[in-house]
Amino acid sequence: MDKAALIVNLDKKEAFTVAERAIEWFEARDKEYLIEKQAAFQLSKSERGADYQKIKNDADYIIIIGGDGTFLHSSHHFIGSDIPLLGINVGHLGFLTDVETEELTKALEMIDSNNYNIEKRMMLQVSHYRNNEKITSNYALNDYVINRSPDTHMLKIKLFINKELVNNFRGDGLIISTPTGSTAYSLSAGGPIINPHQIQAILITPICPHNLHLRPMVISDQENIRIKVDSDGRSVKGCADGRQQNEIVPGDEIYISGADKELSIIKLPDRTFYTIVKEKMNLA
């Protein structure tokens, strides 16, 4: 992989410091590279600037410098492209941006010497129907979340799997996540941790269910989910990866399944999933 592209969180000063170090590494070795055009301007490298389409067309791999939010936002431009992404963490937890800033040079050298792995991460395909018509369709790398606003009473949620009614409950909402998203919002709501490298599955995690017996479910990525939500008419939102929000009104139906596209992520051999979990969860 000869040509890299840099995507930088524009709101984090440290992200630009890390980007400058990467640029120095590229230029010292006469490597080709691109920079997302807004970051390129701020780095005084406008001649290297490129929009997302050019990055998608020309880059062999992409380095995303920021937190997991930056990674999620940027990754949607490259779903199904086979261009692998490497996340450098200048955020907090960093399950997606799992390479720390002090490891940047090591990571670049390992990529340069072909000492890396590429993981294919499953995505969710989410379709929102109203009056039997599709009004939106989204992909999600982490999760799709249905949540009520603070001024809304508990939601009535009907959950169907493969056309069969599985549960009918009241609560604050529902999280449908991939194994990649099992360490995100779902984990905070009591869901299990799933190794995204080893397991293809869909995780269903209720948010504060009134039915105390209700627990998270793990189902096959080949199964199909349908969700119906009733509320008191106030705001209910459906959100894919924390960025694409749609209002859900009574009678709407949400269909979720494993997507036909994946996302490629660069993983360094010494950064296994369990190593990352141990570090991020302060287990060591």
Image: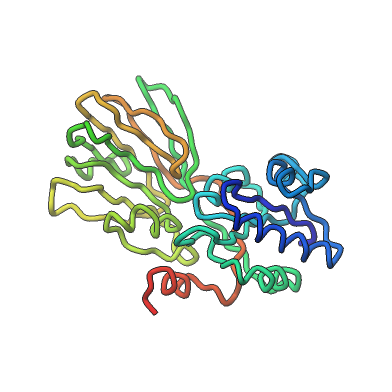
Q: Observer-nearest residue: 217 or 49?
A: 49
Quarter of the view holding residue 112: bottom right
Residue farthest toward the bottom in the current orientation of the protein: 284
Number of numbered markers? 0
**Position of residue 85 in the picture relative to residue 220 (left or right):** right
Is residue 128 visible to us here? yes
Residue at image x 47%, y 39%?
243
Task: Return the x and y of residue 234 as percentages of the image width and height.
Answer: 25, 25
Q: Is residue 255 above or below residue 23?
A: above
Quadrant where the C terminus sits is bottom left
Q: In front here: 185 or 164?
A: 185
* 93 to the left or right of 15: left
Colour logic? rainbow
Give the vertical position of 40 relative to 30 (above or below): above
Q: Which residue lies furthest to the top in this view?
A: 131
> Extreme right residue here?
30
Q: Position of residue 66 (x, y in %)?
A: 57, 55
x%, y% of residue 109?
72, 72
Q: Which of 38 and 224 is in front in this view?
A: 38
Give the quarter of the figure containing the N terminus.
bottom right
The residue at the point 39 percent across, 27 percent down is: 129
Q: Which residue is drawn at 55% across and 61% down?
A: 89
Q: Can residue 264 be seen in this view?
A: no
Tell which of 167 and 12 is nearer to you.
Answer: 12
- Position of residue 108 relative to residue 239, above or below, is below
Residue 207, how many percent across, how many down?
Answer: 25, 47
Q: In this image, 180 relative to 82: left or right?
A: left
Horizontal side, residue 145 vs residue 165: left or right: right
Residue depicted at x 33% and y 38%: 226
